Each structure stands twice: as C-alpha cells, then as structure tokens.
Image (spheres, grey):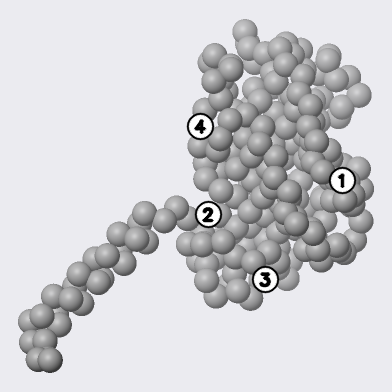
C-alpha cells in the first residue's frame, strides 16, 4: 500500500483537529465545587468525575479558587455538582442560589444535623454518599426536565419556586421524598417557625411554591 503524501497527512491532521474541536464544543461542560485545604475550588469539567476524587478533579478539570458570594447569590443554568463534608459550609455556598440541576455528594463519614439548605428553581436533585455508607446515587425530578422552564406557573420566577433540603437525609438509607405547598402568598406567615423566611423578599402579585425534600 502506498504511503500517503505529505499533503494528505496534513489534511487528515487538520480534519482530525476540526472534528475534535466540534466534539469538545458540543459536549456540555459541568460545574464542580468542592472544598480542599480550607479553599473553595470551582471547576469546569468536560466530563463527570468520580465523586470525592479530588486528585482526578484537579487533573481533568479547570479549577480556580472561589469564595461564597457576599452579595447577590450566584446562579447555575447547567449541571452543578458539589462535594461537601459539612452542612454549614454547604449552606454558605448554596443557600438561595439558583440551581436547576444539582448533585450533592457527601465526602465525609460524619453524621449531618437536621439543617435545611434552600435552593431556588431546583428541577432535578441527585444525592450520593461516598465516604460514610457507599450507596447507589438517588435522583429526584421536581418540576419538569432539567433545562426546561416549568409550565404550571405563569410568569414563573426562579426564587418563586424554593426547595428546602433536610440535610439529615444523608444519614438515612431511605429513598428521597418531597412534597410541595403551592400558591403561598405570604411565605413568612405561612411558615412562621421557619427561620429562613425571616428576611425573605416578598414578591408583589406573585405566589410561591415551596418544596420540602427529605
């Protein structure tokens, strides 16, 4: 068989580079956040990384140091995975953040207290316990498929749809459960003993949907 000419080799190389570039652009990246050596790292990853494998994440992902937002909460339109070891640090990172597709992976063997994490606009939740009791990942679909705007609320706003996660669910082997309370006009009055709502903003002419996940 005749060897390809130098021109053919160059053409094949260029086509291969172009194809790889298209594949890279077509593959949606995901965001990974984890705490390592008292530093919060936010990473953009081209593919899923095995839970709690910090070395692999540092190798495969583009990571930078990040701090919890001091002003307006952040928002994530794509997939967000958070590796965490305690619920307090997780709350500083995510409370009232807009996240549509969230995965939480517990990377510690310590039991978590009954504390609540508040997430806006959540449509899909996945949870995994890696260190304490390795178990299959659990998934819960809330309001339509990720990436789609919920259709049951006209004039839907991300923080008009709030989900509260009981962090003690990571201590149990039972399946994820959720229930929602719709058409809540006065959210602080409806849940007077829930401290999260003490300074929560009121929406004029809007009602809330509050979902509890446990």
Circles 2, 3 touching at the beta carbon (< 8 Å): no
What residue sits right under mark 4 in the picture? 148
Q: Nearest to the eye among marks 1 and 2: give it.
A: 1
Task: Name the quadrant containing residue 117.
Answer: top right
Q: Separation of disc 4 and disc 3 at Cα? A: 31 Å
The location of residue 103, given as percent across then percent down, is: 67, 50
- The 10 Å Cα crowd at callout 4, few under 14, some 14 to 19, many 20 or more, is few
Q: Nearer the viewer, residue 29 or 75?
A: 29
Task: Tell me the quadrant of the picture where the N terminus can be found.
Answer: bottom left
Q: Looking at the rendering, which quadrant does residue 40 occupy?
A: bottom right
What percent of the width, then of the height, locates residue 128? Answer: 75, 55
At 82% from the left edge and 43% from the top edge, which residue is drawn?
175
Report the Cα–Cα distance between label 1 and label 3: 25 Å
Q: Which mark is residue 30?
A: 2
SS class, disc 2 = strand
Q: Earlier in the sequence, mark 1 or mark 2?
A: 2
Q: Which residue is mark 1?
A: 174
Residue 27 vs 122, above or below: the answer is below
Residue 40 visible somewhere in the drawing? no
Which residue bears the numbered disc 3?
53
| Mark before the other along the chain sequence, 2 or 3 | 2
Which element type, helix, strand or loop, lies under badge 3?
A: loop
Picture residue at 63% right of the left edge, 12% below the top? 206
> Image height check: is 13 above or below 112?
below
Check disc 1 and report its element: helix, strand or loop: loop
Which residue is painted at 79% across and 41% down in the image?
A: 176
- In the image, taking residue 91 as reference, residue 44 lies left or right, namely left
**Which tag is nearer the camera, tag 4 or tag 3?**
4
Q: Are marks 4 and 3 in contact (CB under 8 Å)?
A: no
Asked if the residue at tag 1 contacts the one at tag 4, i.e. Cβ–Cβ closer than 8 Å, the answer is no
Please name which of the two marks, 1 or 3, marks the residue nearer to the observer. Answer: 1
């Amino acid at each position: 068989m005749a060897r390809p000419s130098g021109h053919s080799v160059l053409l094949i190389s260029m086509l291969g580079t172009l194809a790889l570039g298209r594949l890279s652009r077509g593959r949606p990246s995901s965001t990974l956040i984890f705490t390592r050596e008292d530093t919060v790292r936010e990473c953009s990853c081209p593919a899923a990384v095995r839970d709690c494998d910090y070395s692999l994440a540092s190798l495969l992902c583009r990571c930078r140091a990040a701090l919890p937002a001091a002003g307006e909460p952040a928002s994530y339109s794509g997939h967000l995975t958070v590796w965490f070891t305690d619920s307090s640090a997780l709350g500083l990172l995510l409370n009232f953040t807009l996240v549509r597709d969230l995965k939480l992976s517990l990377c510690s063997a310590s039991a978590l207290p009954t504390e609540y994490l508040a997430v806006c606009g959540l449509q899909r939740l996945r949870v995994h316990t890696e260190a304490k009791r390795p178990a299959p990942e659990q998934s819960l679909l809330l309001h339509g498929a990720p990436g789609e705007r919920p259709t049951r609320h006209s004039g839907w706003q991300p923080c008009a749809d709030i989900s509260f996660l009981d962090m003690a669910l990571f201590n149990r082997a039972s399946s994820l459960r959720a229930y929602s309370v719709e058409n809540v006009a006065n959210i602080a009055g409806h849940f007077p003993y829930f401290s999260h709502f003490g300074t929560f903003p009121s929406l004029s002419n809007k009602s809330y949907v509050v979902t509890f996940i446990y």
